[in-house]
Structure formats: C-alpha cells, structure tokens
Amino acid sequence: MEEQYENGHQLKDFVETHNLMNRNSIVNFNSIVSITTANNKITNRKIEVMVSFDNYNSLGLVTFLESDIDTSLFPTVFEANWQKMEHIENEFLKISDIHKKNPLIGEYTVKITPLEKIRD
C-alpha cells in the first residue's frame, strides 16, 4: 500500500516539476517515449500523453494518446496504484511492471521525457 502512495507522489512530482498541468488542470503534453517489453521495443517516439488524477480511487493514470501503437504488443495505460513510477533525475518518468494478462508484453519499462504542454 505504501508503494502505491510513493508511485502517486512520483507521478505528481513529475507533472509539477515539468509544469505539465495547464490552467484548466488538464495534463496533456507531447513527449519522447521509449518502451521496452519482453519481445518488442519502441525507441524515442514522439507521443501525446495525458495524465489524470481525478479518477475514483486512483493515485494517477497515464495514457498514451497514440492510435497506431499495437496494444497487444505494448502497454499504453498505466495506473499509479499498480505500476512502479519513478521520476528520475528530474528528467523523465520511468514506469515498470510485468504485464500479468499478456505474456507477449511480459516485463516492461517505459521512459517518458516531456517536451511541451499541448495547451496552456
């Protein structure tokens, strides 16, 4: 339970440090993303990301808003309640876990480096 709160804290720190929330409290930004799974890899791809803190019983939800990522090969939605989130060196957000329902994904690591907010 304590690790969940730490993950939520790391996600909030990432959003605040990089000033990613707009004046309407929406967190929507472009980023450079790398995803490594057990069998596949995406390296330095520009992806639009949304972060939400207002879902019921959620410490934070990260969603990739990219339609051509194959969700059977790569994770695209990450919940701070379940995935390990770390704000590394005030530069990027690292998300890691093992996908328990899809062995094609298996163990994975995601690196999200923010570029700019979509709207201020």
Image (spheres, rainbow, N blue to C red):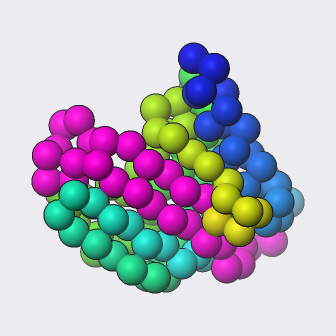
Residue 94 image position (x, y, % from top left): 55, 57
Residue 2 image position (x, y, % from top left): 63, 20
The verdict on residue 101 being magenta is yes
The verdict on residue 46 being magenta is no
Comparing 117 with 14, the one in front is: 14
Vertical placement of 89 versus 62: above or below?
below
The residue shown at (69%, 44%) is 10
Q: Main secondary structure of the magenta part?
A: strand
Residue 117 image position (x, y, % from top left): 72, 73
Corner quadrant of residue 31: bottom right
* Residue at the extreme front: 89
Comparing 66 with 110, the one in front is: 110
Vertical placement of 48 versus 52: above or below?
below
The residue shown at (62%, 37%) is 7
The residue shown at (52%, 30%) is 81
Corner quadrant of residue 43: bottom left
Residue 69 image position (x, y, % from top left): 29, 70
Comparing 68 with 34, the one in front is: 34
Corner quadrant of residue 65: bottom left
Residue 54 can be seen in this image? no
The segment highlighted magenta reads: 93-120
The residue shown at (38%, 67%) is 35
Q: If the image is split into quadrants, where does the C terminus sit?
A: bottom right
Q: Is 13 on the left or on the right of 1, as rendered?
A: right
Q: If the image is split into quadrants, where does the N terminus sit?
A: top right
Q: Is 13 on the left or on the right of 23, as rendered?
A: left
